[in-house]
């Protein structure tokens, strides 16, 4: 992953692919958070893009810096923790 990030900084085509990949994943998470806001389960007025970035940043940190892939239990704990802070 670190190699990909480094390469994307100097290769415009790879940078574009990386940005599109990242955007798609962030949008999927943001869409789920948006639905939570619309249903009243999450607080109105939250920055849904930032909330989606928090989920992604946690996974990125764990994989890149701690060198651990998240399993299903870890993913659930991460999402629960972020959502607990956003609840209505």
Image: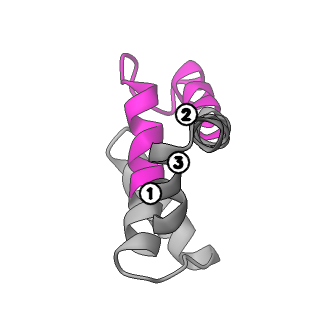
Query: Which is nearer the eye, 79 or 69?
Result: 69
> Which x, y percent locates residue 55?
45, 51
Residue marked by disc 2: 33
Q: Residues within 10 Å of mark 3 (few under 14, many from 20)?
A: some
Q: Which residues are magenta?
A: 28-57
Residue lying at the far front of the rendered structure: 10
- Image quarter of residue 45: top left
Q: CA distance from mark 1 to mark 3?
A: 5 Å
- Labelled disc at residue 6: 1
From what the image shows, is residue 81 above or below residue 43?
A: below
Q: Identify whether 50 is placed above or below 40.
A: below
* Quarter of the figure with residue 73: bottom right
Query: Label 3's element?
Result: helix
For the point 62% across and 27% down, which residue is it?
Answer: 35
Q: Are marks 1 and 3 in contact (CB under 8 Å)?
A: yes
Residue 7 % position (x, y): 51, 55
CB within 8 Å, label 2 to label 1: no
Depth order, front residue of 43/73: 73
Q: Circle 2 — which element? A: helix
Tell me what residue is drawn at x 34 percent, y 74 percent.
65
Q: Which residue is mark 3?
A: 8
The 10 Å Cα crowd at callout 2, few under 14, some 14 to 19, many 20 or more, is: many
Q: Secondary structure at mark 1?
A: helix
Query: Could you tell me residue 5's position as x and y percent?
Result: 48, 55
Count residues near mark 1 (Cα–Cα under 10 Å), then give few for <14, some for 14-19, many for 20+. few
Seen at 47% across and 63% down, the residue is: 59
Which residue is depicted at the point 44% across and 57% down?
A: 6
Of the residues tagged 2 and 1, which is closer to the observer? 1
Whether residue 1 is visible, yes or no, is no
Q: Position of residue 75 (x, y in %)?
A: 55, 67
């Amino acid at each position: 992953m670190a190699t990909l990030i480094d390469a994307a900084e100097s290769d415009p085509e790879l940078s574009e692919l990386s940005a599109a990949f990242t955007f798609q994943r962030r949008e999927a998470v943001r869409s789920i958070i948006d639905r939570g806001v619309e249903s009243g389960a999450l607080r109105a007025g939250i920055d849904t893009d930032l909330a989606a970035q928090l989920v992604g940043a946690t996974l990125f940190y764990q994989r890149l810096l701690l060198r651990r892939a998240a399993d299903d239990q870890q993913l659930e704990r991460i999402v629960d923790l972020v959502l607990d802070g956003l609840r209505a």
